[in-house]
Image (spheres, rainbow, N blue to C red):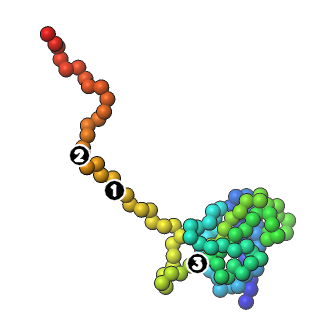
Amino acid sequence: MTVTVTYYCPHCGALAELERDAYLADKAVTPYPFEGWTYAAPDEAYEESEGVRFVCGDETLAEGETGCGEPFYLSFVRYENGEEMDPRRPPERVELRDERGPRGPGGPRGPSGPTG
């Protein structure tokens, strides 16, 4: 079963339409692709990819809409080992160590007292 679904361009708000299978679950529409995900054009076999790459202003625009020409991305829900993937990778934790030990503040020293 196919359905027509509309998406807003995140750059200008124009509406794009996509006729697609109803079983596909949408994850997000973003102005950038998710790292490591594959995207296909709306007229390609996007069911084999993890999303669709639109160009705002192409043939997918809804009637009466004008586009900005910028690409945007529809990402489908993706599973790996039976778990839903989060497209935002957790930040890598980096610990910085100075093996020389703590240092005091840099800069000129203050007065050392009267000399005489």
Decide which of tag 2 and tag 1 comes sooner along the chain.
1
Residue drawn at 76 percent across, 69 percent down: 16
Q: Position of residue 89 (x, y in %)?
A: 48, 67
**Foreground: disc 3 or disc 1:** 1
Sequence-first disc among 3 and 1: 3
- Amino acid beneath label 3: Val
User: With respect to residue 113, does 78 lie above or below?
Assistant: below
Up-down relation of residue 103 to residue 25 (above or below): above
What SS does tag 1 mark? Answer: loop
- Left or right of residue 65: residue 78: left
Residue 67, position in %: x, y? 79, 61
Specify the label residue 101 is tagged with.
Answer: 2
Q: Can residue 62 be seen?
A: no
Q: Which of the labelled discs sits on residue 65, or is there none? A: none
Give the alpha-carbon distance from disc 3 to disc 2, as whole Å: 48 Å
Does dot 2 land on a helix, a strand or a loop? loop
Marks 2,1: beta carbons within 8 A: no
What distance separates the C-alpha of mark 2 from that of mark 1? 15 Å
Q: Residue furthest front?
A: 100
Task: Tell me what residue is drawn at x 67 percent, y 82 percent.
Answer: 47
Q: Which residue is mark 1?
A: 95
| Position of residue 18 in the picture relative to residue 28 (left or right) | right
Looking at this rendering, what residue extends furthest in the bottom direction? 1
> Which quadrant of the structure image shows residue 48?
bottom right
Residue at 74% x, 86% y: name it.
2
Q: In the rendered image, which residue does mark 3 sit on?
A: 77
In percent of the image, x 53 and y 81: which residue is there? 79
Q: Residue 97 placed where, x, y %?
A: 30, 52
